[in-house]
C-alpha cells in the first residue's frame, strides 16, 4: 500500500521541563497539505509539542522529522530555515512597531515581495487598512492575523499555530476560519492547536488528540465530528448539555 505523504513525523518524543516529564512518547504524523488539529484538555501537552517541534524545548528522547530529515538536533533558527513557522499563543508581535514594521522584520531574509504582500492583504484586509498603525492598537483578532501574516510572509513548508481563537469575538473567529481556509487552498500545511472544537471542525482534515503527554486518538476530522460521545470522552465536550443550555437561553 503506498504510504501517505507525511510532512512532519514525531516518533516516541519525550520532553522534560526541569524535573517534569511532560511529553511521554508522543508519536503522530502531519500529512502534507491541509490542516491537522491537535486537541486535548488544558495541560495535555499541546503547546509543549509545538515548542518541542520548534526546538524551543529539547526532546529528551525520540525523533522528529520534517520531509524525512531529522530536525530534533537543530537549533530553533535552523528549524525555522528548514521552513517551519510558529505562531505562539502570545503571538510574538511588537506592540510599539507599526504593522508594516512588524511584517518587514519577519521578512528580513527575503525582503517584502510585493506579490506575496498583496496575497496577504487579500487574506487579511484589515492589515492593509492599519498598515501604518502601531500593532498594539489593533484588536485581538487583528493582532492574531498580523501574527499569522508574519509567519507566512516568506514561503513555509509548515505552519504551527497555537490557539488562535483564544479570547476572540465570534465574528473574528469567522474571519479567521475564512483566512485559514484560503491558506489551505494554497496548499499550506498547518498544525493547529485549539480548544475551540467548532472552529477546528470547520477546518481540520485530520485530528490528533492528546491527554497527559500522550496521543490518545488519531482520525479524520469527519470521523470525530460524527461521534459526539467520543468527543465528550476525549475532550470533555458535553455536546448535549451545550445544546440544552443554548435552548434554555
Ligand atoms: N515552563 C514550564 N515549567 C513547568 N511545567 C510546565 C511548563 N510549561 C508547561 N508545563 C506543564 O506541562 C504540561 C503541559 O502544558 P502545555 O502548555 O503543553 O499544555 P496544553 O495542552 O497546551 O494546555 P493549555 O491549553 O492549557 O495551554 C502542563 O502540566 C503544564 O503545567
Image: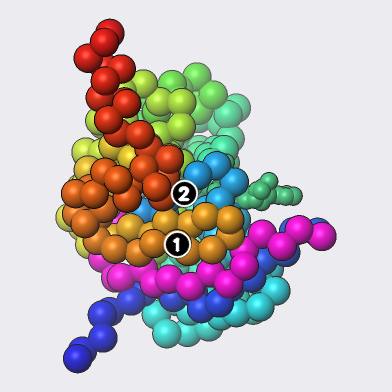
**Earlier residue among tags 1 and 2:** 2
Q: Is residue 75 visible?
A: no
Which residue is farthest bottom?
A: 1
Measuring from the top left, give residue 150's x and y in whole percent.
44, 46
Is label 2 within 8 A of ligand 1 (CB to nearest ligand atom)?
yes
The colouring scheme, among rainbow, by chain, secondary structure or one colour, is rainbow
Q: Where, quadrant-wise, is the C terminus in this rendering? A: top left
Question: Is residue 127 left or right of 93 when viewed as pictured?
Answer: left
Question: Is residue 224 left or right of 81 when viewed as pictured?
Answer: left
Question: Is residue 1 left or right of 197 when viewed as pictured?
Answer: left
Measuring from the top left, give residue 87's x and y in whole percent.
49, 48
Tell me the magenta residue range: 19-35
Gap in angstroms between the C-alphas marked 1 and 2: 9 Å
**SS assignment for the magenta stretch, majority:** strand
Q: Secondary structure at mark 1?
A: strand
Q: Is residue 233 above or below residue 3?
A: above
Q: Return the residue nearer the eye: 100 or 237.
A: 237
Is label 1 within 8 A of ligand 1 (CB to nearest ligand atom)?
no
Q: Is residue 121 above or below residue 32?
A: above
Measuring from the top left, give residue 223's x and y in whole percent.
21, 57
Q: Is residue 25 above or below residue 209?
A: below
Q: Is residue 236 above or below residue 19?
A: above
Asked whether disc 1 touches disc 2, contact meaning CB atoms under 8 Å apart, the reply is yes
Residue that appears at 19% across and 91% down: 1
Q: Give the residue at mark 1.
A: 216
- Indicate which label's residue lies in the foreground, 1 or 2: 1
Q: Return the residue nearer the eye: 107 or 224.
A: 224
Q: Give the residue at mark 2.
A: 40
Amino acid at each position: 500500500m503506498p504510504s501517505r505523504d507525511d510532512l512532519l513525523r514525531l516518533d516516541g518524543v519525550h520532553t522534560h521541563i526541569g524535573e517534569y516529564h511532560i511529553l511521554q512518547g508522543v508519536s503522530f504524523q502531519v500529512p502534507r497539505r491541509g490542516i491537522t488539529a491537535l486537541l486535548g484538555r488544558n495541560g495535555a501537552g499541546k503547546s509543549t509539542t509545538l515548542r518541542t517541534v520548534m526546538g524551543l524545548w529539547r526532546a529528551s528522547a525520540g525523533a522528529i522529522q520534517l520531509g524525512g530529515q531529522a530536525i530534533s538536533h537543530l537549533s530553533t533558527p535552523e528549524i525555522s530555515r528548514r521552513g517551519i513557522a510558529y505562531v505562539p499563543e502570545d503571538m510574538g508581535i511588537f506592540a510599539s512597531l507599526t504593522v508594516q514594521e512588524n511584517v518587514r522584520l519577519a521578512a528580513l531574509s527575503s525582503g517584502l515581495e510585493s506579490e506575496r504582500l498583496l496575497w496577504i492583504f487579500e487574506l487579511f484586509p484589515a492589515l492593509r487598512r492599519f498598515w501604518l498603525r502601531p500593532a498594539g492598537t489593533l484588536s485581538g483578532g487583528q493582532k492574531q492575523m498580523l501574527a499569522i501574516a508574519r509567519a507566512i510572509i516568506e514561503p513555509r513548508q509548515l505552519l504551527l499555530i497555537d490557539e488562535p481563537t483564544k479570547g476572540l469575538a465570534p465574528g473574528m473567529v469567522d474571519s479567521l476560519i475564512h483566512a485559514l481556509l484560503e491558506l489551505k487552498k494554497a496548499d499550506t500545511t498547518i498544525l493547529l492547536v485549539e480548544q475551540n472544537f467548532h472552529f477546528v471542525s470547520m477546518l481540520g482534515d485530520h485530528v490528533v488528540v492528546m491527554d497527559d503527554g500522550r496521543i490518545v486518538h488519531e482520525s479524520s476530522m469527519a470521523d470525530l465530528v460524527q461521534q459526539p460521545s467520543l468527543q465528550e470522552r476525549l475532550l470533555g465536550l458535553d455536546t448535549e448539555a451545550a445544546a440544552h443550555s443554548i435552548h434554555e437561553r
